[in-house]
């Protein structure tokens, strides 16, 4: 299948031993086994995100918060089959998107992408598309209608995410041809989700009482559990992006261990200086920020350089969280600060530090390319998300009624409660100042 070399993501084109092949690729059972495991690891990240976000929400909206992540598995999984994969990776595309020749995974049966079955490659990429939409939900919890989120998420996956993945990871894509480095999704997933979350929070408006009302996490153990599951799954997210069990995967695995560790320590240190005490939520947030920052760079920088990526990513995101109220957008769970900002820092540091492994172009040239890639992702996802939200708003209200927002969305949206004793009011808003 001669077109496959044109549809391989940048990760494989730069990192895999099979890249130098001019003859037709052959199936490697070891690579295939690893990619099946890696795909399963990435799938686990979305339930992990549900726990992470759910623990940070209020008691009376925990199910709705978690469902916004869980529903993405079904929603985006089906849409990836019907068109998302084809828009991103089908052969014969132009600089901005592919066609629909792989609609319904048509043409993938019995074919290879590199040394693995194309079905496995499509499944692996589906996991990325799923969590990209789920990440956005953290910015709009406790006030966005579930149906509106589902409609927006489906449109966003097909019309925003899939084309951006094509730009960066398809050899026909214009950012790919430019030489932009994004090994596992810093630009395609985290910047995209962070910017889209910020736009969505701005369009919906703030939660009732923001910023005078503190919506405190109702279950910190959930937050720690979710962070742990995310880190575990992220090993497949980053190392799996080599699409082979090779030295590139080994480097990505190592930097995905080191950078989050450094970021967590950095966050706890900054937190201790600012408030006098390190917190469990801070530890979980720091390690997630480190995972975000290292994602685009994980196979392009050395393990030692990954420490710097983790430290700077955590410092930038920590500062962004402190400035949250000045942005006048109630990004409920700091999706922009933790994913958008850390994703931008990681993308830029990829260009600055790729020389540590001999990847990319000369530093100055690569930095210019990375800046272009970041700017393009911000513009595309920001404007696109704004338009989609306005279109969804013409079909149905984006926001729940005030009474439901105050009482919590679980019962009104799902006829369920997270806890049988939710009437105790645990996790309810706490007024911290003002009239």
Image: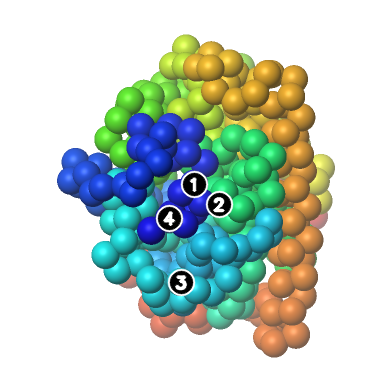
Marks 3/4: CA–CA distance:
15 Å
Residue 251 visible in this rendered orientation of the protein: yes
Percent of width and height locating residue 15: 43, 32
**Distance of label 1 from label 4 (alpha carbons):** 15 Å
Label 4 to label 2: alpha-carbon separation = 15 Å
Identified at 77% across, 75% down, the residue is: 390
Nearer the observer, 178 or 411: 178
Does label 2 or label 1 sit earlier along the sequence? 1
Taking the image as shown, residue 78 lies to the left or right of residue 346, namely left
The residue that label 4 is drawn on is: 2
Which of pointers 3 and 2 lies earlier in the amino acid sequence?
3
Cβ–Cβ under 8 Å for marks 2 and 1: yes
Q: Examine the rendered structure and indicate whether residue 136 appears above or below residue 186.
A: below
Q: Are marks 3 and 1 in contact (CB under 8 Å)?
A: no
Circle 3 residue: 102
Q: N-terminal of the two: label 3 or label 4?
A: 4
Element class at badge 4: loop
Eye-nearest disc, 4 or 2: 4
Q: Mark 2 highlights which residue?
A: 170
- Nearest the viewer among 173 and 40 is 173
What residue is disc 1 on? 9
- Pick the front one: 267 or 173: 173
Spot occupied by residue 61 in the image (x, y as percentages of width and height):
49, 66
Of tags 3 and 4, which is closer to the observer?
4
């Amino acid at each position: 299948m001669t077109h496959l070399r044109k549809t391989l993501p940048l990760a494989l084109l730069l990192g895999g031993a099979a890249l130098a092949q001019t003859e037709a690729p052959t199936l490697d059972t070891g690579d295939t086994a690893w990619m099946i495991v890696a795909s399963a690891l990435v799938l686990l990240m979305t339930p992990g995100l549900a726990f992470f976000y759910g623990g940070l929400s209020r008691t009376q909206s925990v199910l709705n918060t978690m469902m916004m992540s869980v529903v993405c598995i079904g929603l985006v999984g089906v849409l990836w089959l019907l068109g998302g994969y084809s828009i991103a990776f089908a052969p014969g595309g132009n600089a901005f998107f592919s066609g629909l020749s792989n609609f319904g995974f048509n043409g993938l049966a019995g074919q290879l992408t590199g040394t693995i079955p194309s079905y496995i490659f499509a499944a692996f990429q589906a996991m990325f598309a799923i969590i990209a939409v789920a990440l956005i939900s953290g910015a709009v919890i406790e006030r966005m209608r579930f149906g509106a989120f589902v409609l927006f998420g489906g449109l966003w996956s097909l019309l925003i995410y899939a084309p951006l993945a094509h730009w960066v990871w398809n050899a026909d894509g214009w950012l790919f041809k430019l030489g932009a480095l994004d090994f596992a999704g810093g630009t395609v997933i985290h910047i995209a989700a962070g910017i889209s979350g910020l736009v969505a929070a701005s369009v919906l408006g703030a939660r009732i009482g923001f910023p005078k009302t503190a919506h405190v996490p109702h279950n910190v153990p959930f937050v720690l559990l979710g962070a742990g599951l995310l880190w575990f799954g992220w090993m497949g997210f980053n190392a799996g992006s080599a699409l082979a069990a090779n030295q590139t995967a080994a480097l990505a695995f190592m930097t995905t261990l080191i950078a989050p560790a450094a970021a967590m320590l950095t966050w706890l240190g900054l937190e201790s200086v600012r408030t006098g005490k390190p917190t469990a939520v801070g530890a979980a947030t720091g390690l997630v920020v480190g995972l975000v920052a290292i994602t685009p760079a994980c196979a392009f920088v050395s393990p030692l350089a990954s420490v710097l990526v983790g430290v700077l990513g955590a410092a930038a995101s920590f500062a962004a969280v402190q400035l949250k109220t000045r942005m006048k957008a109630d990004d409920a769970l700091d999706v922009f600060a933790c994913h958008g900002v850390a994703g931008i820092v990681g993308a830029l540091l990829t260009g600055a530090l790729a020389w540590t492994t001999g990847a990319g172009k000369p530093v100055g040239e690569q930095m210019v390319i990375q800046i272009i890639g970041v700017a393009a992702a911000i513009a595309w996802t920001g404007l696109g998300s704004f338009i989609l939200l306005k279109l969804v708003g013409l079909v149905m209200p984006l926001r729940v009624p005030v009474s439901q927002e105050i009482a919590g969305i679980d019962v009104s949206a799902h006829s369920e409660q997270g806890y049988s004793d939710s009437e105790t009011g645990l996790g309810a808003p706490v007024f911290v100042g003002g009239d």
